[in-house]
Amino acid sequence: MNNLELKKVANEVRKGIVTAVHSAKAGHPGGSLSAADIFTYLYFEEMNIDPKDPKMESRDRFVLSKGHTAPGLYSALANRGYFPVEDLTTLRKLGSYLQGHPSMQYIPGVDMSSGSLGQGISAAVGMALGAKMDQKDIRVYTLLGDGEIQEGQVWEAAMFAGHRKLDNLVVIVDNNGLQIDGAVDEVCSPYPIDKKFEAFNFHVINMDAHDFDAIRAAFKEARETKGMPTAIIAHSIKGKGVSFMEGQAGWHGKAPNDEEYAVAMADLEKISEELNREEA
């Protein structure tokens, strides 16, 4: 896919996020929107996957370590063809398979149940080690929040991954600078994030999480890195794409009401129109 095609898909992913959270009247839009371009690149360009065969043995694996941003993952999976986009409106509803955190038991394309912060990266490290031990050409990707990396378990997993030289592992930190209680550097600063991962023997890449040239280059560099795992520090904007959500910690875990939903969808529709003009 070229960059314009990826931008259009990412905007559809954002529409799905806003629609799902509005329908549920609960959920986490801010960090889902900040990671939408990453979800899009992973599922539409980077990973070896097949929506028609979600359990394909040779597939690459993805673990959403910041599991509360499930609306972002679900919207990417739906738009990629794992299940109907219409099902996004059942988010968090009684009896729906799309609950507040991803479940590998019920959702096609979900490789690991997640939600307890800090645990997803450990599962991803285990998957990467298992692939190495079985001599399988499988890459493993995991997405963490910058607030999540305040968890000690993250660094235990990172220490192990660096020690075992898991060059089939890519850890992505969605660095939007905000967590549920406010700015990450005020709550409990994880900075400098890049230097910390370097200290754990990771190859580190800083990138703009909303620039597909930068995203493409970062994942290419990660793929070409041998003998050590890669950490991509993705500098992003919380609530990206929705005017009143951008850069606002209050939209970490809150659903838009009907009026806010209308404004959000109008914002995203305007982006669609701009991308269509760009194509023409």
Image: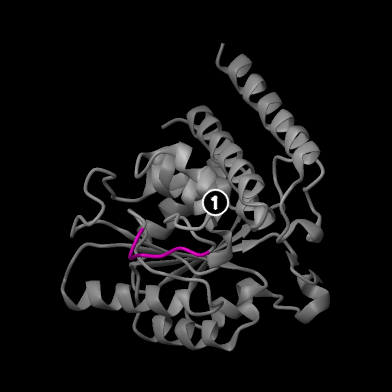
Q: Residue at x 75, y 64 (%)?
A: 178
- Answer whether residue 215 is visible to the viewer in this image: no
- How many numbered marks, from 0 up? 1
Tell whether position 104 is magenta. yes
Q: Residues within 10 Å of mark 1 (few under 14, many from 20)?
A: many
For residue 21, side relative to residue 204 (left or right) = right
Q: Residue at x 65, y 81 (%)?
A: 150
Q: Dot 1 lies on which element?
A: helix
Q: Which residues are magenta?
A: 101-106
Residue found at the far front of this picture:
94
Q: Amino acid at mark 1?
A: Gly
* Percent position of residue 39, x then y: 49, 50
* Percent position of residue 220, x then y: 41, 51
Q: Quadrant of residue 164?
A: bottom left
Q: Nearer the viewer, residue 117 or 157?
A: 117
Q: How is the image coloured?
A: one colour
Return the residue at label 1: 72
Q: Residue at x 25, y 56 (%)?
A: 59
* Percent position of residue 37, x then y: 56, 45
* Percent position of residue 248, x then y: 81, 55
Q: Looking at the figure, which quarter contains the N terminus?
A: top left
Characterize the magenta stretch by its predominant secondary structure.
Answer: loop
Q: Residue at x 39, y 77 (%)?
A: 123
Above/below status of 161 relative to 145: below
- Answer whether residue 162 is visible to the viewer in this image: yes
Above/below status of 17 relative to 269: below
Q: Looking at the figure, which quarter contains the C terminus?
A: top right
Above/below status of 71 relative to 268: below
Tell whether position 170 is magenta. no
For residue 112, side relative to residue 129 (left or right) = right
